[in-house]
Amino acid sequence: MARTVKDAAYMLSAIVGKDKLDNWTLAQPFEEAPKYVQSCKISGLKNARLGIPRNGIDYYVDDHHTPIMAAFEDALQIMRGAGASILDKTNFKVFDPSAFDLNNSIVLDTDFVAGLADYLTRLAKNPNNIKNLDDISRYTKSDPREEYPNRDTYVWDRELTRNITNESPESWAAYHATLFMAEEQGVLGVLDKYNLDALIMPTFASFHLPAIAGLPIVTIPLGFYPAETRSTMNLKGTLVSVAPGVPFGIAFIGRRWSEETLISLAFAFEQRTQVRRMRRPFVSPTFELGQRMLKPLNAPDTDGTRYPSIKESVPQPTLNPSRRRYSKSIYGYFSSLF
């Protein structure tokens, strides 16, 4: 996550590289990291061929997505105006979300159990002698700080009762089924069939297939829920799901190692729309990457508000000029993380 496409390009160049413990990175077709920022060109959309897999979008659309889809259609006109060719209804050959979800849950469950156990063996310190998911589940249920059962272990329990591993035939069959749906029958099949540079989708519908196939996505701001939007909480009632001003995005999806193309497309769209500037953030940083905060913020007052400490030559986060102090709820949320 980054403030702009260009910032993300700089960060990607800094973190990309091969890791002997990560087979995905060893497959990189280059030895030296690309200078991704050079792909940030205002002309990036010119002559681009972009496809819209409507069947991969429509399945997820409900009444809450009406403003998003309206903004998405407007975005298509902007891209056409920038010289892109938009091919509509370049649908996935097969898109069966129920079968995908079933197989995907098997893959995720078995991989997580194996991967977690492997990770725990590599810890330099393990004071509670946690060795696997079963240990974590027991610890979570026995320690009152974990707030069980209000914060339940349903997913872990499901994973622990499958009685198969990520090397079992059932797991391999599920993996290949999801991979086939994501690649040949999905993203890669559409890109090849229509000779496309990328697919474009609202962010809420974009990540399911690419996540399985290991394909890159660049998602950028598309808009915000309008002022008349009715606020809706998540199922647990602890987080706002939809409300006025909540942002939503648009995603550019491509082949493996097509990050430079996706960055170019996203940058060109970003520069023409500048959606990020349509809302003023509640808190804005006044320093750039590479600088360090040498002093922490002042401790909160008795009512929970928190003010920045004022230290010369020490970069500090500043409040939105329209706000006078930090929100108690914002402070409470972040203080719980650190």
Image: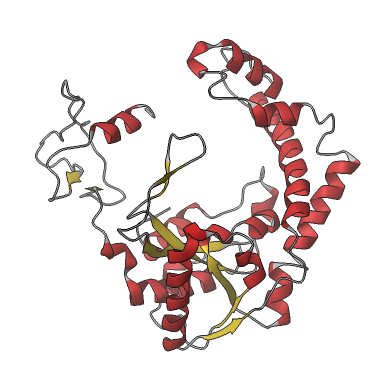
Most foreground residue, 33 or 88: 88
Q: Is residue 305 left or right of residue 191?
A: left
**Colour pattern of the rendering:** secondary structure
Please name the residue shown 17% across and 45% down the image: 319
- Give percent across and percent down for residue 179: 77, 57
Q: Is residue 107 left or right of residue 127?
A: right
Count of number-bearing discs: 0
Q: Is residue 35 among the parts visible in the rendering?
A: no
- Give percent across and percent down for residue 178: 77, 55
Please name the residue shown 24% across and 48% down the image: 282
Please name the residue shown 49% across and 61% down the image: 65
Q: Which corner quadrant holds the C terminus? A: top left
Most foreground residue, 114 or 151: 151
* Figure check: 103 above or below 135: below
* Figure check: 282 above or below 139: below
Please name the residue shown 43% across and 34% down the image: 238
Q: Is residue 47 among the parts visible in the rendering?
A: yes
Most foreground residue, 211 or 56: 56
- Give percent across and percent down for residue 67: 43, 65
